[in-house]
Image (spheres, helix red, strand yellow):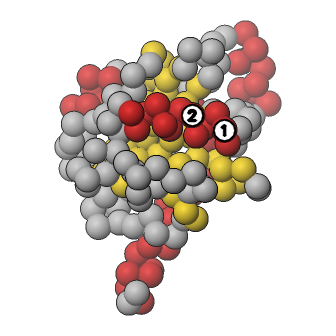
Amino acid sequence: MPAHEKQRARRCTHFVATVLGLLALPLTAGAQKAAASQAPPMAVSRMGQVMSAAAARNSIGFPPFLPPRTVVAVALLPPFRGDDTRANRGIGFEYLDAPGRRYVLAEWPENDGSIAGFAELPFHDPRCPSARTVRRGTSPNGIVWTTARGLVMTLVADGPNDARTLEREWSKLIRRGVCR
């Protein structure tokens, strides 16, 4: 791989790892106190600007994949790569599964970025061959992949990580077409 491609892969890997790391940050003491008396804080608020789904969709340049579950928050995300324009911005959906566990599905235009710097996923699915893992300690913190439509996507569970639970949710999304 030429040096400029390695540098581009490192920058893109760093960006995604930073976004996923922000999701893993604990709440500040003030936010924890406020959270005790209010609804749980939104994980997507640590990634971008929370807004209505319609406003976020109007601020991006691609049709997003919509999670098949109850969406509780939507955020407009800074670009994965490129200038901060409508064509480069991403969108994040925070949603609940049936038992009430929160997930964040984030999507961006790929813009010649690369996810090659991430480790390969231990559970391979041929319907989504580009999938990689983002690790925190010995467990995956999230899953990152590219789609045939030229998007980079991530899936992160909000809260304690359980690789099996994350893999099950990702498999459900694959069956719904998230990798197409």
Q: Quadrant of the N terminus?
A: bottom left
Q: Residues within 10 Å of mark 1 (few under 14, many from 20)?
A: few
Q: Nearer the viewer, residue 34 or 18?
A: 18
> Tags 1 and 2 in contact by the CB under 8 Å rule?
yes
- Is residue 51 shown left or right of residue 120? left
Tag of residue 168? 2
Farthest-out residue, bottom = 2
Residue 45 can be seen in this image: no
Residue 69 can be seen in this image: yes
Label 1 is placed on what type of residue?
A: Arg
Residue drawn at x 41%, y 57% is 129
Farthest-out residue, top = 37
Is residue 177 positioned above or below 129 on the image? above
- Is residue 129 shown left or right of residue 33? left
Secondary structure under the numbered disc 1 in the rendered image: helix
Residue 100 x/y as whole percent: 61, 16
Label 2 is placed on what type of residue?
A: Arg
Q: Quadrant of residue 75?
A: top left
Q: Which residue is the site of mark 1?
A: 164
Q: Quadrant of residue 162?
A: top right
